[in-house]
Image (spheres, rainbow, N blue to C red):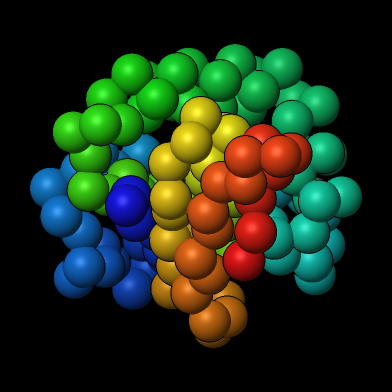
C-alpha cells in the first residue's frame, strides 16, 4: 500500500511521511476559486495548463517506476487545498490503475482519508 499525502507548506511537512519523495507544487498557482483539488473540474482546469500537466505526468511516471519500493509520496503547496490535492488525486488514480492499493490523505482540507483499491473488472478504483 502506498500513502499519497497532500499538505500545506504553511503548516509544514506531515509527520506521517515514510521517507518517500516530497513534491513542491508552490510554483504552480491555482485560480479555481473556492473549490478544492478533490473536484474533477479543478483537476481538469489544472491539467489544461501545459506546464502543470507536463510536471504531473513526469511525477506520475517517476512514482509509477518506483511504486514497488514506495511507502509514501507527498505533494505540498502553499495552502494545501487545490494544487497539491489535485496532484495527489491524479497520481493516486494512476497508481490504482496500475494495480496498487493507495490511501489518500489531504491534511489541509480536513476530509477523511480514503482507501482506494484497484478493481479487476474496470481498472477503476473503489473506496
| Residue 123 in sight in this render | yes
Q: Position of residue 62 (x, y in %)?
A: 36, 20
Q: Tell me the quarter of the image containing the C terminus.
A: bottom right
Residue sitting nearer the eye, 118 or 6: 118
Q: In percent of the image, x 82 and y 38: which residue is there?
A: 44
How many numbered dots are placed on residues in this image? 0
Q: Residue furthest left?
A: 19
Residue sitting nearer the eye, 88 or 119: 119
Q: Position of residue 27 (x, y in %)?
A: 50, 36
Q: Position of residue 29 (x, y in %)?
A: 63, 43
Q: In percent of the image, x 81 and y 51: which residue is there?
A: 40
Residue sitting nearer the eye, 97 or 121: 121
Q: In percent of the image, x 48 and y 74: which residue is there?
A: 113
Q: Is residue 30 above or below residue 99?
A: below
Q: Residue furthest front?
A: 121
4 sits to left or right of 17: right
| Residue 4 in sight in this render | no
Q: In percent of the image, x 36 and y 28: which residue is there?
A: 63
Q: Is residue 21 above or below residue 42?
A: above
Q: Position of residue 6 (x, y in %)?
A: 44, 58
Query: In the rendered image, which quarter is residue 23 located in?
Result: top left
70 sits to left or right of 26: left
74 sits to left or right of 14: right
Q: Is residue 120 above or below residue 58?
A: below
Amino acid at each position: 500500500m502506498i500513502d499519497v499525502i497532500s499538505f500545506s507548506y504553511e503548516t509544514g511537512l506531515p509527520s506521517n511521511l515514510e521517507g518517500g519523495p516530497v513534491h513542491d507544487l508552490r510554483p504552480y498557482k491555482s485560480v479555481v476559486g473556492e473549490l478544492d483539488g478533490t473536484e474533477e473540474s479543478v483537476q481538469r482546469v489544472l491539467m489544461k495548463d501545459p506546464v502543470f500537466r507536463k510536471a504531473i505526468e513526469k511525477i506520475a511516471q517517476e512514482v509509477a517506476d518506483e511504486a514497488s519500493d514506495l511507502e509514501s509520496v507527498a505533494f505540498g503547496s502553499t495552502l494545501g487545498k487545490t494544487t497539491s490535492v489535485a496532484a495527489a488525486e491524479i497520481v493516486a488514480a494512476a497508481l490504482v490503475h496500475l494495480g496498487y492499493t493507495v490511501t489518500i490523505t489531504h491534511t489541509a482540507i480536513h476530509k477523511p482519508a480514503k482507501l482506494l483499491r484497484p478493481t479487476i473488472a474496470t481498472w477503476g478504483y473503489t473506496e
